[in-house]
Image (cartoon, helix red, strand yellow):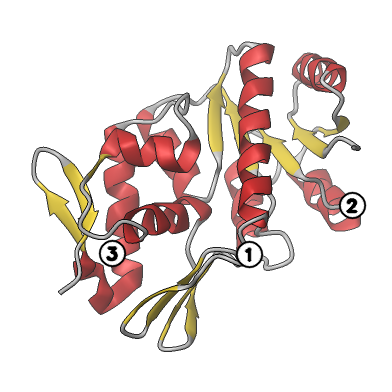
Amino acid sequence: MSKEKILVVDDEEDILELVRFNLAREGYHVTCVQNGEDALRQIRDSAPDLVVLDLMLPGIDGLEVARKLKSDPETSHIPIVMLTAKGEEADIVVGLEMGADDYVTKPFSPRVLAARIKAVLRRKREGQGTADQQTITVGELAIHPGRHELTIAGQPVRLTRSEFQILLCLARRPGWVFTRYQIVDAVHGEDYAVTERSVDVQIAGLRKKLGAYGKYIETVRGVGYRFKLG
C-alpha cells in the first residue's frame, strides 16, 4: 500500500531537511515549501494527506494558512500538525481553535513527530471507515459521524475538527461524565500535549455554536463534562 503524502511548511531549511529525511525514511512522500503562499498553492495543485505547518512564516503566517484550509470545504478535511517554537498555552489554544489536529513544539524529537503524524493519519483513516455509523439525533440537532458534519434544523454548523470530535465523544455516551484528559485522549490520543484550559476553551466555543442546544453539554464541577438530555 502506498504511503501518504505529507506537505512540510517551514522557513528554516535545516528543519525542512530534518523533517523530510525522517519522514521519507518512514516511507511517506514528502514535499517541502518555505512560506504560506507556496503552501496554499501546493495544496491546491496536489492535496496532501497531512500538513506539517510552522506558525512563524514570512508573509502569510501559519495560523492564516490553517484558517484558509479549514474554512474551505475542499481542504477542511486535511489534518494539520503544527510544528513551532511558540509553545505557550495561549498559542496551543489558538492552534486548536483553528482546527489543528496536533501541536509539536521546537526543539522536537523527529521520532516523536513521526509518531504523532502516524497517530493523526490513523485517526483520519478510522474516521473515513465510519461512514455507515448511525446518525445521532437530539431534537433538530443531528451529528453525522461518517461525514464529520453537524446540522441543526437541517442547516450545517461549522465546527473545527476538535470541536466535532469532542461533541461526538460526549454525545455517543449521554449521561457519562468525561474528565478533561479523557476528552483529550478520545479526541487526540493519549500522547497529545494539551492543557485542561484548552479543553474548556473549546467547550465554550462549542456551546456557543450549538446555540440553544449548548445546554446539553453540562459541566460537572471538579470532574469534567457530560452530554445530558432533558
Check disc 3 and report its element: helix, strand or loop.
helix
Q: Quadrant of residue 178?
A: top left
Residue at left 44%, top 27%? Answer: 190
Which of marks 2 and 1 precedes in the sequence? 2
Residue at left 15%, top 74%? Answer: 230
Kind of residue at disc 1: Ala
Check disc 2 and report its element: helix, strand or loop.
loop
Q: Is residue 11 above or below residue 124?
A: above
Kind of residue at disc 2: Ser
x, y (%) of residue 34?
80, 33
Mark toward the viewer: 1 or 2: 1
| Front residue (pair 106, 187) | 187
Which of marks 1 and 3 precedes in the sequence? 1
x, y (%) of residue 119?
61, 32
Q: What whole-number distance in Å separates the C-alpha atoms at marks 1 and 2? A: 24 Å
Q: Residues within 10 Å of mark 1 (few under 14, many from 20)?
A: some
Question: Can residue 58 be spotted in the picture?
Answer: no
Q: Is residue 2 above or below residue 150?
A: above
Q: What whole-number distance in Å separates the C-alpha atoms at marks 3 and 2? A: 35 Å
Residue at left 32%, top 43%? Answer: 199
Q: Quadrant of residue 16?
A: top right
Residue at left 58%, top 12%? Answer: 107
Q: Which residue is mark 2?
A: 46
Which numbered tag is attached to residue 131?
1
Which numbered tag is attached to residue 207?
3
Kind of residue at disc 3: Arg
Q: Residues within 10 Å of mark 2 (few under 14, many from 20)?
A: few
Check disc 1 and report its element: helix, strand or loop.
loop
Which of marks 2 and 3 precedes in the sequence? 2
x, y (%) of residue 114?
69, 22
